[in-house]
Structure formats: structure tokens, C-alpha cells
Amino acid sequence: MGDYRKLWESLQMDLEKHDALCAVLPELYGSVYLSQKDRAEAMNYFNFVISEVHGLRIEELNNHRQKGGKVVGTFCVYVPDEILNALGVIGVGLCGGSQFWIEDGEKVLPRNLCPLIKAFVGAKISATCPYFQSCDLLVGETTCDGKKKAYEILAEYAPTYVMELPQMKREKDIKDWEAEIKRFINEIENLTGNKLTYENLKNSIKLINKKRRALKRLYELRKNTPSPISGLDALLVSQIAFYDDIERFTENVEKLCDELEKKISILKANRKKRLMVTGTPMAIPNWKLHHIIENLDAQIVVEETCTGTRYFENEVSEDGETIDDLIRNIAERYMKINCACFTPNEGRVEDIIRLAEEYKVDGVVYYNLSFCQPYSVEYKRVEKALKDKNIPLILIETDYSTEDVGQIKTRIEAFLEMI
Amino acid sequence: MFYIGIDIGSTATKVSVLNEDNIIKNIALPTGWNSKETAKSVEEILKKEGFFEEAKIVATGYGRVSVPYAHKTVTEISCHARGVYHLTKKDFTVIDIGGQDTKVIELKNGQVASFLMNDKCAAGTGRFLELMANILGLTLEEMTDLARKGESVQISSMCTVFAESEVISLIGNGEKRENICSGVIDSVINRVYSMVQKTSSSGDFFLTGGLCENDYIVERLSKKLGKNVKTDKLARFAGSIGAALFAKNI
Ligand code: SF4
Ligand code: SF4
């Protein structure tokens, strides 16, 4: 990494503490990622992005802002990137995935709260995440109670705007969401001084559809037995999707797919069990579960999570005569995301069963971040549905700490012996 | 050829030796601080008894990775299941109250059909009982003996740390020791019971692990589950017997 201290300083970061964070990441990345065998050449791009995660990309954000552009941070895949991009904003996903921030988060939040929330609040108040520091606005949403209330605390530290996300999926709710997107457009127009037009919105929709299509192509390749890419690598690509430059990212995912396509014909069969992970998101650098699983005789072939299929499935329809048509299309596409914050959420159960068949999985790991209520309550319904289909399932409830790694390993190992 | 299963648990290590037809030897020793050291002691014992030279060895338990001479490792969940099925030839729901963790394993045709394991916390495990016995200045046996004579007081906290202060304040309030002992046992039994509730098991129960030799625990557990909980004089060794059986497949 180059010397970015001046840049970090200008972002009012706590440099000393940030050094401590920077010290742990390379080692973790080395042992989890670089130690993998037979990785695709094209993963080098993503290695590079990670090695520059607090460097080059931050400089890009900074340059953008120097030129008068804005950067907006988001916390949920429901916040429409199409709008941000059309209005010249760089959107960055800000979910915190590191244990490093938990302690600071717990200074202002109860301990028995989802680690994702504790980490992102901790990242902001400790001023150690350059993405947070680069944001002109944070955009929250009314999903789970924990996040909803945490935005009130975040707002004390940075300008924060909250979108009201419906909790059901009736026609009325889609209309509400459409109206909410319009309010959001207003907000971002005011922030940037730019105006949303039919052209810039349509181009933005096309651009982001392309990105989704590239990710979908990557996932399609994982349907092959054996999958040409590890679950760890696929997860990394999904995580990077949240903050990398859209065009460059898409191009590199396509390159990766080209290489993997060629690789498929020379892959030898192995005895690894094929697993699906379903549940709560895994924000960078949360690689804990994938790392445990793929060090055993198993491969993760699909993630039904927001850092997986929920991020890219369904495109925004590009048909529409007016700007309102396009906005309606956006509302419709987003309301197809099946998140446990909605009731009912039968769509998710159907997705899991469909994906289990499409990806020919031997079993499903239900990943639940500790204290995430929506997903842990929904477990029962998923369990019942999978039981009816004779698909083996195991529940792993955990946070970012490493103390339970041994126990999780035993459980997964026993699960693999069972299926 | 000997088939040897070594089950290194957090408190006790169990070793079973099988030949083609029978279980010929079971050995138990404390695990101590270091499972690598324990594995060495086991190696010495096996050598002295003449089992080591021609043997297939499977290690299990939380210390399974510390046995360099094992040919294979298998988790304690699969081993307990296999061991119990070998001893009983029946599809039981196996309850294993271990030192660090408690497991409920459902069998179907002798195979693991599903299992549950407690989370990080020690509630409902042997460790919890040991801690509480310690606070009361008793051994585990003394604690269960006293509990038999007591009338259970409620210990409402499931968390070991809070339960500890609850017990201390009960002692401070002059509550009878036998009643506290009874309450402690109840708290473990309740925890195991709620784990069993989470499974769909309707079958018969079989208790393995260190506590299975304790009649009183078996009695209380049976009462709570509303079903006779079976066990066996070899139930302690279910894990190592299962491991030895896996050694036969190598
Ligand atoms: S899990 Fe739900 S709340 Fe969380 S990012 Fe996904 S859609 Fe948003
Ligand atoms: S994982 Fe669950 S609790 Fe955590 S932010 Fe997402 S929905 Fe909320």
C-alpha cells in the first residue's frame, strides 16, 4: 500500500487506532485467502482491491469529492444504487464485518445486539473506517429494529437520512416504496445539485443490470460439479461489489468468468460436499464461516444472503417511456428481495428450495449472526420446509469473535459426516 | 489387528480396544491440561499392553487433532451415535452431557439423523455442575448425594456467571445446602430438557458421557422427560467404542 497518511489525516481519522486495524488485515487475508490452492489468475484483481482497501479506492473517492462529487454510504441492499449512480454519487456499502469495531460499538449500544450493527457504529465513532469518513451522507432504512434505532445514534456523528422500507409486500407497499424512492431522489438531488433525467436514470439502470448479470454469470458457473471457484473467493467478489467502481468491477468479474469457464473442462471430480449458506449478510472481512467450512471436506457453492444471490437476482426492467415508469421498475425490482424483515416472507423459503435444487447442494448451513431476531425467528419455517424436502440443515449462530471456531468446526464436521 | 478408539474429552479421555469380534479393553484417564500429553500417555499404555503395533486408530472428542498417531479423526457426534447403536442395536435419542458441551443426537437406522449442540455457554454441561460444586465446596458425587435429600430451590439464571452469584447469595441467605444442590441439578436438567424439546425426537433416550454413572441424574432426567432414560455400564465409553468401530472401516 502506498502512503496515504495525509489522506487519512484529512479525513479526520484516528490514525493510531487505524494502524492497529491495518496491521491485522493482511495477515488475516494471507491465511484465509492467499493460502488457497488453484485459484484463478483473475482473482489477482480482487487481491489487489483488498490490499488497497483503505488506500487507492479511498483516494478515488477523495478525487471524486475534490471535483465536487458526493459519496453516500448505505447499509442495506434495498437502497437503490441506480438513483445514486444516476445522480453522480458514488455509493459505498458500509456494513461492518470486523471484530475490531465491536468494542467501540458497545460503548454506545447494548451488548446483546447483532455484531453487524455494533461493528458499523463502532467503525464510525472510532473514526477508523475511511469509507465512513469519506461519506457526505449516510442512508439508513427501516429494516430490523436494531438498525433502525442505531441510525439515531449514527446521526449524532454524521448526516444521516433514513428511508422507510415497508414491512409487507402488497401492492400498496410497492406503491409506498415507489413514493419513498421519489423522496430519496429529492434528497440526493438536493445533496448533489444534479437533476435526475430519463437518460441518466436509464443509463444507470443499464449499468447496474450489467453488474448484476456479471455476478449472476459467476454464480451460474458455481452450479458445475465441482465448482470452479471456492466459496471464499465468490464471497469476496460479492463483498467487493459493495464499494468498488461499478464498470471496472463488472469488467473484472467477466474476466474471472471467462477464465473459470475454460477451467471447468479440466477440473477433476472431488469428494467435497456441496453446501449452501443462507441467512444474514457477511460484511468484509467476515470470512469466518466460509473459512471453517472450506478447510473441511466441503465447498460452498451458493449463498442465499445479501452478500450473495439477494444482491444480484432480478434485474430492473429497462422498458419504460417516462422517468416515472423507470422509478416504478426500480421499486418493483427491489421489492422482490426476500429479507426476513418482511412478513410474510415465503419467497425466501421458496428461493432456498429452488437454489438447493439448482446448485445440487448436499446440505444447507443457516448462518445467523448472534442476536439477529428476524433471521433466527424465520429459522423455524425454513427448517420445516427443508425437512419436508429432505434437505439436511444445520443452524450456526455466531458473531465475529474467534472463541467458538473450534466448536463450529466440530458441528460442521459432524454435519458433513451425517449427510 | 486391533481397532482402537481414543476419545479425548475436555475432562476425561476414554480409550476402547476392539478385535474382530469384541470389545476387549476400556480405559479411562483424566485429560489434564494438555491433550497432546494425554495422547502420549495413551500411546504408552497401548504399547505396554501390546495393542499399538498392529492397530487402526481413530481419534475423536475435542482433542482429536492432538493425536499424531491416529489414522483418522471423526467427530464425537458420529462416534457417540455409532457407539450407542453398537451397545443397544436401537435407534435411541442420545443425550451426551459432556464437560464442555452437551449434545442431543437422533438416530435413524443406526445413523445420525440430526443433532444439536449447546452454544458457547457452559449452562447445561458438566462444566456448570463442576463449577457449582466448587462454590459449594463439594465434589460432584457429594453434590448429587445431597441433592437427593433436598427440596429444589429455583436457580433462574441460565448463564453460568449469573447462576454463580445466585448460588452465592443463596448460601449467604442461609438456604440449606441440599436444597441448593437440588436446584443446581434441576437447572442442568431443565437446560437439557429444553434442548431435547428443540429436536423432534419422540423416541427413547440414552445417556452417555461422564454423568451417566450417576443414578440420581438419570432419575431426574427421566422424570423431567417423562420417559425412562436408559444407560449402560459402558455408556461412558460410547464415544471411544464408536471411534474404534470407525477404525474398522479404514
Ligand atoms: S438482510 Fe435485510 S436488512 Fe440486511 S441488508 Fe439484507 S435486505 Fe437489508
Ligand atoms: S443481520 Fe439481522 S439484526 Fe443484523 S442488521 Fe441484519 S437484519 Fe438487523
Image: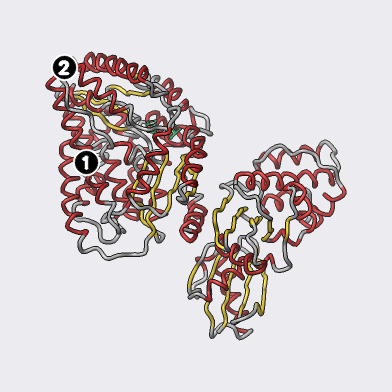
Residue B168: percent from the left, percent from the top?
76, 40
- For disc 2, the neighbor class at 10 Å (few under 14, some 14 to 19, many from 20) is few
Along the horizontal axis of the image, is B58 left or right of A162?
right
Pick the residue in front: B250 or B155.
B250
Say if A125 sits above or below A354 in the image: above
Q: Are marks 2 and 1 on the same chain?
A: yes
Query: Which residue in the protein does label 1 denote?
Result: A3
Residue A156: percent from the left, percent from the top?
40, 19
The amino acid sitting under disc 1 is: Asp
Within 8 Å of ligand 1, the CB of disc 1? no
Mark 2 and mark 1 lie on one chain; the one further toward the N terminus is 1
Residue furthest left in the image: A199
Residue A333: percent from the left, percent from the top?
28, 28
Query: Which residue in the protein does label 2 denote?
Result: A322
Q: Residue at x 29, y 25 (%)?
A: A332
Pick the residue in front: A370 or A154.
A370
